[in-house]
Image (cartoon, rainbow, N blue to C red):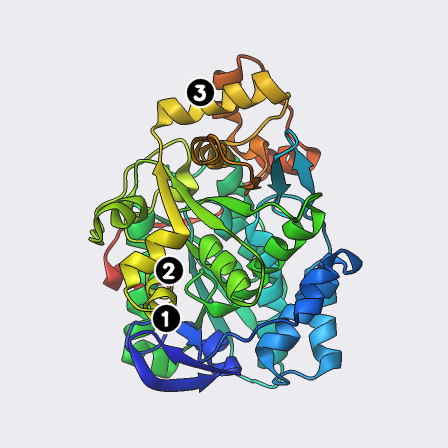
Amino acid sequence: MKLYSTNNLKHIVDLKTAVLKGLPDDNGLYMPISIPSLPSSFITNIKDYSLAEIGYKVCKTLFDGYIDASNLQGIIERSITFPAPLVPLNEKMGVLELFHGPSMAFKDFGARFMAQLMGHFNKDEDELLTILVATSGDTGGAVAAGFLNTPGIEVVILYPSGKVSDIQEMQLTTLGGNIRALEVAGTFDDCQTLVKQAFLDKELTQRKRLASANSINIARLIPQSFYYFEAYKQLQDHSLDTVFSIPSGNFGNLTAGVLAQKMGLPVSKFLAATNVNDIIPNYLKTGEYTPRPSKRTVSNAMDVGDPSNYKRLADIFSKEGSTWNNMKDMLKGYAYTDAQTTAGVKDIYDRFGYMMDPHGAIGFLALEEYTQGKDVNGVILETAHYAKFKDTMDSTLGFSTDTPERLQELLGKKKVAKQIGVSYGEFVKEL
């Protein structure tokens, strides 16, 4: 498998380099030179495959023999150990629950796969590999759980102080071992900027092996494509068009869906659903990509003012002609305020008896708005368990919601995090 930088088509590397390096020196993002199609028989017979078997088939097709079958099978089997059930709200609308992994967020799919893949590529290296990851909420906890005690790898997680939920913070600050947390006095965008600066710092990269676990790393996107196929498998009526509504912050999850579609998954539309940080919805309306400082919301994982994966989306759609025209034909953008979001949480509970977190609720609002008068299969990606946002859920619903035992146990643990500012000099001293 060969990949190139979105900033330089002539900068070509193999899969190991792309995964362990994370970010090209030119500040682009790695993309496959070609996206191969799965056999049509795979889609036709998809109900015969387990989620792990889907993952193996996708990777085998993408990697094209780069990893031998036995090792690839092991990577998949150790990564994909939890389900992604599609729970119907009504006959035409379902919720794809992606919170059944260790950290109870969709990031578990990418983090566990990445940990196994990096472990495979790193097994013969003597020098420690340091993984840098910026998180707006769920990525940090998933990466911490996925990489805990992985030999030869240490993880440094940057998160914005006061801008993640209590449970999210405890998930990334209490494990110890090879996991370190840096509490940054800034926003997620500040954290992401520090990580990107580190990868572009030639002096640092010459003395220290660095890798990224954010969705800038292609190894995060690939396993996130698995559950789009899994959702399609669980639909009852494949004669209808399929629409995925995706709560979106850094847009890695949506990009993974587009990857699945390019490999052959029948998808009619992707709904890019977000909060007031509406960079992509605004781009889809105007054709102007205008990043700006993020604003804090109750759907904190989507508080991103400069989504990294815009580069990948633009790269994919530019190959078919006008980037903007092609992108807005396939993607529909929606943005909602906190008041609309919490009203959505309550409406979902009142109508369906289903508790959906604020991020999923934004996906629900977008799907309802899009499907008015349309006869389609609608799938909402529920990206995290509602209990990770207990304060918002309780105040919105008017009662104390339950917290799973594994999350409740976190609140009694001791937080260990080093507080730093947003200057690169202060950050690099911690590496």
Give the amino acid at mark 2.
Asn
Q: Is residue 293 left or right of residue 23?
A: left
Residue type pointed to by label 1: Leu
**Callout 2: 10 Å neighbours few (<14), some, many (20+)?**
many
Q: Which mark is residue 309?
A: 2
What amino acid is labelled 3 in the image? Ala
Q: Which residue is identified by label 1?
A: 29
Secondary structure found at label 3: helix
- Disc number at residue 322? none
Picture coordinates of residue 158, whole percent (x, y): 40, 54
Q: Residue at x 57, y 72 (%)?
A: 37
Crowd class of label 3 (few under 14; some 14 to 19; many from 20; radius 10 Å): some
Residue located beneath label 3 in the image: 343
Is 119 in front, or is 4?
4
Name the spot of residue 218 as percent of width and height, x first: 48, 69
Give how far across and how far down residue 42 sits, in percent: 70, 66
